[in-house]
Image: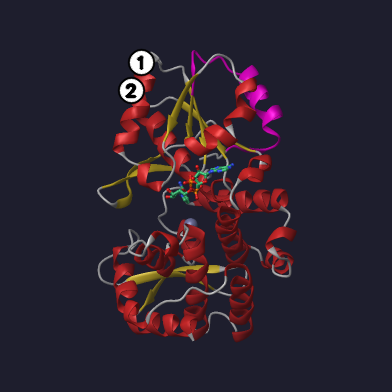
């Protein structure tokens, strides 16, 4: 599995790619936001092409939108030598990649991720898919794009809350794989971070992990640090009024504190490390208020995790800074303590 990723101005990387290729047709997939903010930068670099614009947001990462995309591909008479360009965040990358991967049993696609989250996480690793009947990423495949073209320039129009959400995955990559990088980021505020450098770092960490374990039999699970309780918190907050919902990274930030506490209690990290993690994450993300009556609901939600086997809940937990262990069984009592610690 070879994840090809290029971090460069799109005005250089895309023309270079196209000059080396001979595609019969090009289809661009964007959502309403990326059509407005990102497509104008790409359009002048492209030959004649068809543009599909789909509604933005996770709510549209579904079969109905896929049908719209496949309809357009079919009407444009795309053959197997055509190219799909996905311009957008993780929703467009996952869904556009999925549409390309099954159209006529698979045509080439290129990811042009435009959110921080998709640049440091979603666009790397070959997981593609859509939500189905309320289940996240329920239908999907593993398939690699021809290349991922990352240009940090796109981040300039990204809402600040989205930028912060993507930063959670960068924090995760530092904590699970690189103690020195953690030391570098943890003294800086969000607006002092060097995005180009951090994107390159995160891509390297993720690539290295997924290349050793593309289909998540073992090692790849370390990328789930913060995600077992984080996902449960994210799902729980979906039931809240719109203004109180959490972005993915915001929930993962909560999960990283809770799961660091579990690691501390299991003597996998020192108290000092727990405090560092907590202090930095609170300084960037603030603290989320979780009502005591919601604790059991959140704990129960961890059972929905796709990674579970049978009844036991298994976590990926820090094993010192820059290292992570996986498949560690965690009891409901331990989770309860972690939620209480976070709230405390
Ligand atoms: N495949 C994987 O390995 C993987 C990993 C992590 C997450 N994901 C998936 O990624 C999705 C979340 O991705 P996301 O956070 O990028 O969400 P997203 O794609 O919904 O983008 C967030 C919002 O930002 C807008 N936007 C995107 N780029 C913009 C820009 N440059 N300027 C202004 N607005 C812009 C989008 O239109 C959207 O409204 C989820 O569906 C998740 O399942 C996949
Ligand atoms: Zn994540």
Q: Determine which of the numbered discs, if any, sits on residue 259 in the image.
A: none
Residue 292, position in %: x, y? 36, 82
Residue linked to disc 1: 75
The answer, for residue 105, to whether it is visible in the render is: no
CA gap between label 1 and label 2 equals 6 Å
In this rendering, the answer to whether 112 lies above or below 285 is: above
Q: How many marks?
A: 2
For the residue pair 191 and 260, the one nearer the viewer reads as 191
- Left/right placement of residue 64 relative to residue 31 reads left
In this rendering, the answer to whether 313 lies above or below 145 is: below
Residue linked to disc 2: 71
Q: Secondary structure at mark 2?
A: helix
In this rendering, the answer to whether 73 lies above or below 237 is: above
Is residue 26 within the magenta segment? yes
Residue 202, position in %: x, y? 62, 53
Residue labelled 1 has its Cβ within 8 Å of some atom of ligand 1 = no
- Label 2 CA crowd tier, 10 Å (few <14, some 14–19, many 20+): few
Residues under numbered marks 1 and 2 in contact, where contact means CB atoms less than 8 Å apart: yes
Is residue 266 within the magenta segment? no
- Left/right placement of residue 125 relative to residue 103 reads right
- Label 1 CA crowd tier, 10 Å (few <14, some 14–19, many 20+): few
Residue 55, position in %: x, y? 41, 37
Residue labelled 2 has its Cβ within 8 Å of some atom of ligand 1 = no
Quadrant hosting residue 301: bottom left
The answer, for residue 83, to whether it is visible in the render is: yes
Range of magenta residues:
4-27
Q: Secondary structure at mark 1?
A: helix
């Amino acid at each position: 599995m070879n994840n090809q990723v290029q971090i460069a101005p799109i005005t250089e990387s895309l023309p270079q790619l196209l000059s080396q290729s001979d595609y019969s047709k090009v289809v661009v997939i964007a959502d309403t936001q990326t059509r407005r903010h990102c497509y104008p930068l790409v359009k002048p670099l492209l030959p004649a092409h068809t543009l599909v614009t789909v509604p933005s947001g996770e709510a549209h990462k579904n079969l109905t939108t896929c049908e719209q995309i496949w309809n357009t591909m079919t009407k444009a008479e795309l053959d197997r030598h055509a190219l799909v360009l996905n311009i957008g965040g993780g929703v467009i990358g996952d869904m556009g990649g999925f549409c390309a991967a099954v159209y006529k049993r698979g045509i080439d696609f290129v990811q042009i991720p435009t959110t921080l989250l998709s640049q440091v996480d979603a666009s790397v690793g070959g997981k593609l898919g859509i939500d189905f009947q309320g289940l996240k990423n329920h239908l999907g495949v593993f398939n690699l794009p021809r290349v991922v073209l990352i240009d940090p320039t796109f981040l300039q129009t990204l809402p600040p809350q989205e930028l912060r959400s993507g930063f959670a995955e960068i924090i995760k990559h530092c904590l699970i794989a690189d103690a020195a990088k953690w030391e570098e980021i943890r003294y800086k505020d969000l607006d002092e971070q060097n995005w180009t450098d951090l994107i390159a770092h995160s891509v390297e960490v993720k690539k290295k992990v997924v290349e050793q374990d593309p289909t998540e039999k073992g090692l790849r699970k370390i990328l789930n640090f913060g995600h077992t309780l984080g996902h449960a918190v994210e799902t729980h907050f979906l039931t809240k009024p719109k203004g109180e919902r959490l972005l993915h990274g915001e929930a993962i930030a909560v999960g990283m504190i809770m799961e660091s506490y579990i690691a501390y209690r299991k003597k996998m990290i020192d108290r000092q490390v727990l405090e560092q993690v907590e202090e930095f994450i609170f300084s960037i993300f603030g603290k989320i208020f979780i009502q005591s009556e919601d604790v059991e609901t959140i704990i129960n939600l961890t059972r929905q995790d796709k990674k579970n086997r049978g009844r036991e809940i298994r976590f990926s937990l820090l094993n010192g800074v820059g290292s992570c262990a996986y498949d560690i069984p965690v009891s409901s009592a331990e989770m309860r303590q972690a939620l209480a610690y976070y709230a405390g």
